Image (spheres, rainbow, N blue to C red):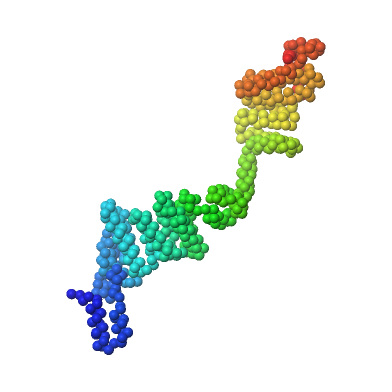
Amino acid sequence: MTTPPKYVSALSTLLFFFLGLSANAVLLAQTAPAENENCRTWVGKDFQEEAENAHVLYRDFLKAKDYEQAYTYWKTAYELAPAADGKRASHYKDGRQILLEFFKKETDEARKKELAEQILKLYDEQIACYGDEALLLGRKAYDMFYHLRTPYAQVLKTLDAAVEKGGNNSEYIIFDPYARILVYEYQNGRMDAERARQIILKLNEIADYNIANNQQYGSYFQQAKEAMEAVIAPVEPEIFDCAYYKKKFEPQFRANPEDYEMLKQFYNRLVKQGCDDSDPLVAEIKAQYEKVVAEVNAKRLAEFHAKNPGAHAKYLYEQGKELEEQGQGGEAMAKYKEALAKYDEAIEKAKAEGGDDGQFALYYFAKASIEGRKLKHFSKARDLAYKAAKLKSNWGAPYMLIGDLYAMSANSCGSDAYERGLVILAAIDKYAYAKSIDPEVAEEAGKKIARYSSHKPDQNEAFMRGVQAGQKAKIKCWIGETVTVRFK
């Protein structure tokens, strides 16, 4: 029967006394602790050779990924000497690897639970025997979250302990599970905003420290931080205020002040989090965003216009209209002329690319409108309008334009009311023709015919000239058309 430890201690004391050993030696013998069974080594033991042989054999099978054979010898080595030779934690670490492989393949839930408990127990034993608590707690939490399906409350408790012990020395692998559990617990009402805020701020602190100081793993912490930010994005605005986002965004803003998508995101988020436009940083980001957007839009527009001169011509025309409305007639005329030049460029480009008649018709009509309505080049405008009409059948717009040009010329092409009336007849004829071929302009044409009908020649004045209804009359001036006389 084995002698209990307290009797062994007493006998040793008497023996040392009779051998004349010093009082210090007696004290050491009385207080020497017994070896922790979970930390037992094979060193100096009668089973050392058996344990070492089992250790070597299971390691060979483990390298070959023969987990069944590895387990058999690992179990022997572990049970004999959990701490191996006291210099390596192989039996705890390798045991977890083997058992985890069994866990992945196991289908029985009771057995899976048992395997999970054994894996976690090996973590605890390694911590007790070899230390390195912060590192092992983090890896334990990682396995609990990704492999062992441990309840979140337990994983969170382990993560908290890992960060408390490790601080800035915590591993980057804890970031993702920590963030995912935080979001889940917060969204389900089991974690308040203050607690979530504390965790995120602490993880950011750890990440930033390692990004700046950890040469070996700094990039890993950067990736872990970015991944965490993506995970917490759905709840982050509920947890943090303006000050947090200012601190978060400013370094990124300083590093990339030309990234307009980022600037837009930053400004909108700051405003949503309660930041005021009068805040210096917010105002600076807003101003920079507006500047960059203007530059980007101008560049994109220039690139688009370079490839699409027709669109550029229309843009210049609209600019001219705005200048004209602002009373800047000279600048407006310059824009209209630029627009005409761009339409010429568009026509040449369309010819080179084999453009269709409909496209050419639109370009010629646009030129006709500018020449006639804006630059008052009536004859040139009419020629362009007829050219456009020939390229697109049953199109009333060109004839409506010619009618408008005639009506605009009534005062300048007629020396008296009768002659002006003849010009109006020419305009009405164009409106009537447009109405007859194109239903889309019929309503507008009808309104213009009705409006100008009161300006037809006066019958009494015609009689004094010896002109009867139905006679033909030629109009002077640039118009040069012959009309059938009728009266108002």
224 to 318, vertically: above or below: below
Q: Nearer the viewer, residue 305 or 11?
A: 11
Answer with left or right where residue 283 lies relative to residue 24.
Answer: right
Judge by depth and name the residue closer to the eye, 359 or 281.
281
Does residue 29 sit above or below 303 in this rendering? below
Number of numbered discs: 0
Query: Extreme bottom residue here?
Result: 20
> Where residue 348 appears, x then y in whole percent?
66, 35
Q: Residue at x 61, y 29 (%)?
A: 358
**354 relative position to 168: left or right:** right
Q: Position of residue 355 (x, y in %)?
A: 61, 32
Furthest-left residue in this view? 1
Q: Quadrant of the C terminus?
A: top right
Image-quadrant location for residue 486: top right
Q: Is residue 454 visible?
A: yes
At 31% from the left edge and 70% from the top edge, which residue is drawn? 39
Q: Residue at x 67, y 29 (%)?
A: 365
